[in-house]
């Protein structure tokens, strides 16, 4: 099964989801649906709802209104994090489109993010299970901690790999993990399966962010929807750059220390660093880590008490897609 077959398998659910996403941000304040439509029409793979849907189907569940509501909750929270993140990073391009902060201003981006969060809370208020409410509330807290931790360590090279992985867990893996866990919680799967789905999501999320960090240096603008090297310009010390910094000579170390301070790096300077990352096998090092996380995720989910093997196959296909997206686009040097 490949990724397009997975989305084909979920076609009816995904179109129901798109409708619900649009319905639920309706407001009589025109700017809200205005920006909402701009974002929804701008694409996105709906990765978190997709994982939630597949996880619930693993346990034999039919998609009902409650499942779709929780898909909207995770997607809205995710959208809020991106709207806020783009303000923090002063990003101007996302998924090939101008960001909301660039088009409407930072105030609009922050407030529309807040609106999405408020809609997520309201949708969640329809749920009576404290475990579900606690899981999502805890994730919202972890996401904000991730954003703050990343922001306070921006442009710093004296960070550890452990800290970088911690930021990745909080800002990315936490919401991916809770999306998978929700599949088990909503279907009242046994506790062991709930734990396995959570671990699957943790590792999937780490692999997902590692691939994102690799592709930021090694992907094409067409694939990324933004120029390569954005992380370096925005001052994010991700794993490829840290690996290079910790394994290079004094001269290059000094250059990196200068580069990380500068949001105005030229294309030539970015290409110079990308070349050094390839030479030092920093891309390969990060890719290997991503593959290891994803392999463990795949092994873990196979142990859950699955009722529908077709959806296990689909979940594994999504895991492969995340890793292969890079390799398919550009074989690693
Ligand atoms: C994008 O990562 C950023 C995040 C996944 C989350 C950052 C979290 C916050 C800004 C806190 C806000 C939290 C809430 C709940 C509103 P990235 O920068 O690696 O990806 P990108 O390159 O696509 O921007
Ligand atoms: Mg960002």
Image (spheres, rainbow, N blue to C red):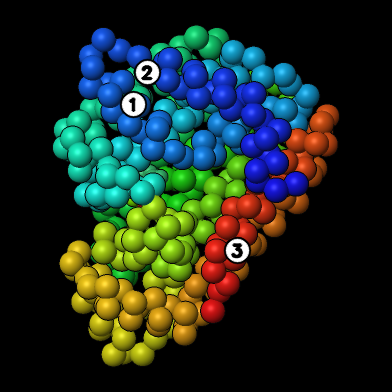
> According to the image, label 3 marks what residue?
328
| Label 1: which secondary element | helix
Q: In the figure, 269 relative to 153: above or below? A: below
Residues under numbered marks 2 and 1 in contact, where contact means CB atoms less than 8 Å apart: yes
The residue closer to the viewer here, 250 or 291, is 291
Q: Which mark is residue 25?
A: 2
Q: Is residue 211 left or right of residue 315?
A: left
Q: Quadrant of residue 57?
A: top right
**Residue located 57% across and 57% down the image:** 325
Q: What percent of the width, then of the height, locates residue 43? A: 44, 38
Residues under numbered marks 3 and 2 in contact, where contact means CB atoms less than 8 Å apart: no
> According to the image, label 1 marks what residue?
36
Label 1 Cα neighbours within 10 Å, binned few <14 / some 14-19 / many ≥20: many
**First reached walking from the N terminus: tag 3 or tag 1:** 1
Label 3 Cα neighbours within 10 Å, binned few <14 / some 14-19 / many ≥20: few
**First reached walking from the N terminus: tag 3 or tag 2:** 2
């Amino acid at each position: 099964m490949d990724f397009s077959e997975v989305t084909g398998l979920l076609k009816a659910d995904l179109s129901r989801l798109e409708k619900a996403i649009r319905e639920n941000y309706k407001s009589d304040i025109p700017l809200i649906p205005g920006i909402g439509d701009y974002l929804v029409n701008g694409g996105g793979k709906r990765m978190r709802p997709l994982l939630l849907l597949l996880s619930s189907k693993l346990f034999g569940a039919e998609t009902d209104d409650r499942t779709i509501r929780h898909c909207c909750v995770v997607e809205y929270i995710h959208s809020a994090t991106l709207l806020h993140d783009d303000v923090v990073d002063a990003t101007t391009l996302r998924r090939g489109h101008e960001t909301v902060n660039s088009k409407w201003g930072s105030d609009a981006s922050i407030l529309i993010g807040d609106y999405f969060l408020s809609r997520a809370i309201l949708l969640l208020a329809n749920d009576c299970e404290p475990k579900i409410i606690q899981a999502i509330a805890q994730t919202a807290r972890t996401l904000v901690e991730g954003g703050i931790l990343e922001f306070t360590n921006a442009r710093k090279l004296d960070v550890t790999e452990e800290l970088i992985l911690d930021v990745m867990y909080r800002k990315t893996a936490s919401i991916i993990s809770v999306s998978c866990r929700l599949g088990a919680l909503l279907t009242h799967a046994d506790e062991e399966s709930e734990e396995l789905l959570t671990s699957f999501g943790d590792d999937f999320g780490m692999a997902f962010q590692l691939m994102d960090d690799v592709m930021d240096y090694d992907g094409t603008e067409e694939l990324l929807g933004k120029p390569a090297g954005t992380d370096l310009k925005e001052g994010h010390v991700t794993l490829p750059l840290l690996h290079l910094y910790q394994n290079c000579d004094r001269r290059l170390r000094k250059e990196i220390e200068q580069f990380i301070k500068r949001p105005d790096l030229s294309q030539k300077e970015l290409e110079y660093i990308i070349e050094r990352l390839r030479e030092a096998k920093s891309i390969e090092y990060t890719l290997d880590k991503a593959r290891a996380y994803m392999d463990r995720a795949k092994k873990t989910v196979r142990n859950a008490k699955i009722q529908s093997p077709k959806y296990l196959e689909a979940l594994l296909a999504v895991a492969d897609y995340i890793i292969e997206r890079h390799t398919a686009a550009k074989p690693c040097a």
